[in-house]
Image (spheres, grey):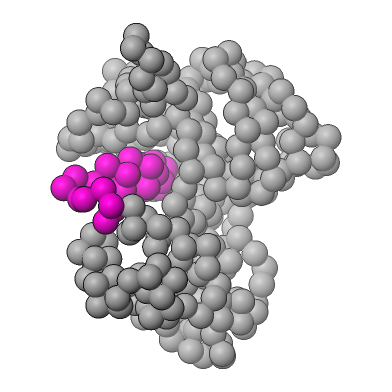
Amino acid sequence: MKRLDEVGVVRMLGYRLNVEKPLALKMTGKFVSPSPDWTHMSRLLLDYELFVQTKGQLFIADEEEQHALQEGDFLLMPPRAKQFGYRKSDCSFYWLHFTVDEHLTDSCEIESYVPQEGSIVIPRKGTLSNDKIVVLMKQLQDSVRSYQDTTLNNYLTTSILCELYNQAYLSKNAPNKKLKQLQLYNDIVDFMTWNRFEQLKVSQIADHFGYNVKYLSHLFSTIAGVSLKQFIMQQKIEAASFLLTDTNQTVNEIALQLGYHDSQHFMKSFKQMTNLTPTEFRNASANRLLYYR
């Protein structure tokens, strides 16, 4: 949500959460609309609800604003919000309900937030930069089904919100970076995110943006802390992780989709990055919770 102050400046609102102790999971799942005519129910929220859109559009509102979530968007609604669907929605999304002690959370303006130990801030709405949240939510669902361990599930829930904090706030508020260089870095990240299924090379990325390979590699590693070549590999593995946990494709099919010439090369790369084989990774988050409501 955005708010205009007295001089007309747009202020982004969010929620500050204390994570010195884990948040409390209430329930979670993945929802797929049963028909194109489905509309979200009307209700009063009793806890926080996080939406992560994976397909189509979700048209949902509260008493203050109407939201049209698209693939890759997230939305955090607070307790006591009057939630309702205002249009038919043909879509799918992950959802997560959690609670926080009232004295450990409050609403705040994102611009005025000062990072501090044991505290995170989550914008009310935004767009994810990668699929890590979906992978973490899959792991949480597998934990709910496999272990039924409240402590573990609460910590997994907290890790999801901390990852969201890193994507939605920290990565967009990195200090001491020149604006032009930071914009170029973000453009490179976006380009690789959208083209991660292609066989990208550092020289191709440099040509695309019109920069020298050595300069671009140095700029990227200075900001990201990893080399451009390493980041390309990370993007491949993140895409593979998503496909392994959210589809029923075979390992060989995923390898081909990601541009690998054979599954053995893919499995070796995956093991190097995650210390797990693709099959072991899939088995670690195999029990997806699928809801139709």
Occupied quadrant, residue 271: bottom left
x 63%, y 33%: residue? 68
Stretch in magenta: 155-182
Q: Which residue is outermost to the top?
A: 6
| Left/right of residue 222 with respect to residue 41 in the rendered view | left
Q: Nearer the viewer, residue 145 or 79?
A: 79
Q: Position of residue 49 (x, y in %)?
A: 52, 31
Helix, strand or loop for the magenta stretch, by majority: helix
Residue drawn at (32%, 23%) of the image:
109
Residue at the location (29% across, 70% down)? 216
Q: Nearer the viewer, residue 2 or 14?
A: 2
Residue 18: percent from left, percent from top: 27, 30
- Picture residue at 71% right of the left edge, 29% below the top: 40
**Relative image position of residue 223 (x, y in whole percent):** 23, 60
Horizontally, is 96 left or right of 122 in the view?
right
Is 270 colored magenta in this rendering? no
Q: Is residue 165 located in the magenta-colored stretch of the structure?
A: yes
